Each structure stands twice: as C-alpha cells, then as structure tokens.
Image (cartoon, rainbow, N blue to C red):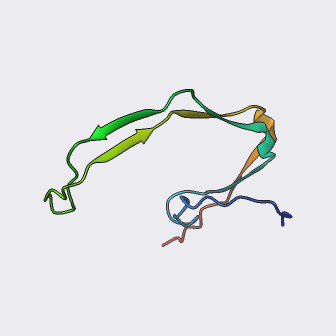
C-alpha cells in the first residue's frame, strides 16, 4: 500500500469497527512541526512512596518540559475513514 518509511501510533489500540471509523492518517510528515519550548522544570520529591503508600526512604526528581506540535500545510494530510457496518433486524 505505502512504501516505507511509515509510522504507527502505539496509542491507537481501538479497532476501527468498535468506537471510531477514522483508522489512519496519511501524509507528508515533513509538514508536521514539533517544537520543544525553552526551559526544563525540575521539582524535588522529598519522600517517595511505594504502591501501598509506605515510604521507601528515597528522594526523587520530577522533571518536565513543554512542547507543541502543529500541521504546517493542512492539505499535506488525509484521514482514512471507513464505513460502519450495521446489521438490520
């Protein structure tokens, strides 16, 4: 269908016939821009806890940064949709 390279989203777990009929996005991903914002935020976690709520005697760091994404040229992408199959009574 499409020669490599292609990308598959690991977050797309639903089947096309269950909750949605949009199953794929095709396009030129050189027209998709991802931008990392300047700055990294780091917070100290003074007391770490395990899954049952007991302290582990450890300290931790929580670090995150902001990013953004945008389509540069809208016509560079297409969404593949399929019809929903229904059975009549």
Is residue 2 positioned above or below 59 on the image? below
Say left or right for 77 vs 53.
right
Q: Quadrant of the N terminus?
A: bottom right
Is residue 16 positioned above or below 78 on the image? below
- In depth, the one of 42 and 78 nearer the eye is 42
Q: Picture coordinates of residue 71 (x, y %)? A: 71, 35
Query: Residue at the location (54% across, 71% down)?
Result: 87
In this view, the residue farthest toward the left is: 54
Query: Residue at the location (76% across, 59% down)?
Result: 6
Corner quadrant of residue 42:
top left
- In depth, the one of 57 and 13 nearer the eye is 57
Is residue 89 positioned above or below 39 on the image? below
Q: Picture coordinates of residue 17 (x, y %)? A: 56, 66
- In depth, the one of 89 and 17 nearer the eye is 17
Q: Picture coordinates of residue 83 (x, y %)? A: 65, 60
Say left or right for 62 vs 14.
left
In this view, the residue farthest toward the top is: 38
Say left or right for 58 vs 3.
left
Say left or right for 31 vs 48.
right
Query: Residue at the location (26% across, 48% down)?
Result: 59
Q: Picture coordinates of residue 61 (x, y %)? A: 35, 44
- In depth, the one of 9 and 21 nearer the eye is 9
Is residue 30 positioned above or below 80 on the image? above
Corner quadrant of residue 7:
bottom right
Query: Residue at the location (58% across, 33% down)?
Result: 68
Tally the numbered discs. Answer: 0
């Amino acid at each position: 269908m499409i020669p490599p390279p292609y990308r598959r989203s690991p977050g797309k777990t639903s089947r096309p016939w269950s909750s949605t009929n949009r199953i794929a996005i095709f396009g030129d991903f050189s027209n998709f821009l991802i931008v990392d914002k300047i700055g990294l935020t780091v917070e100290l976690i003074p007391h770490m806890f395990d899954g049952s709520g007991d302290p582990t005697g450890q300290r931790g760091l929580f670090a995150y940064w902001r990013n953004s994404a945008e389509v540069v040229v809208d016509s560079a992408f297409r969404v593949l949709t399929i019809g929903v199959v229904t059975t009549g009574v």
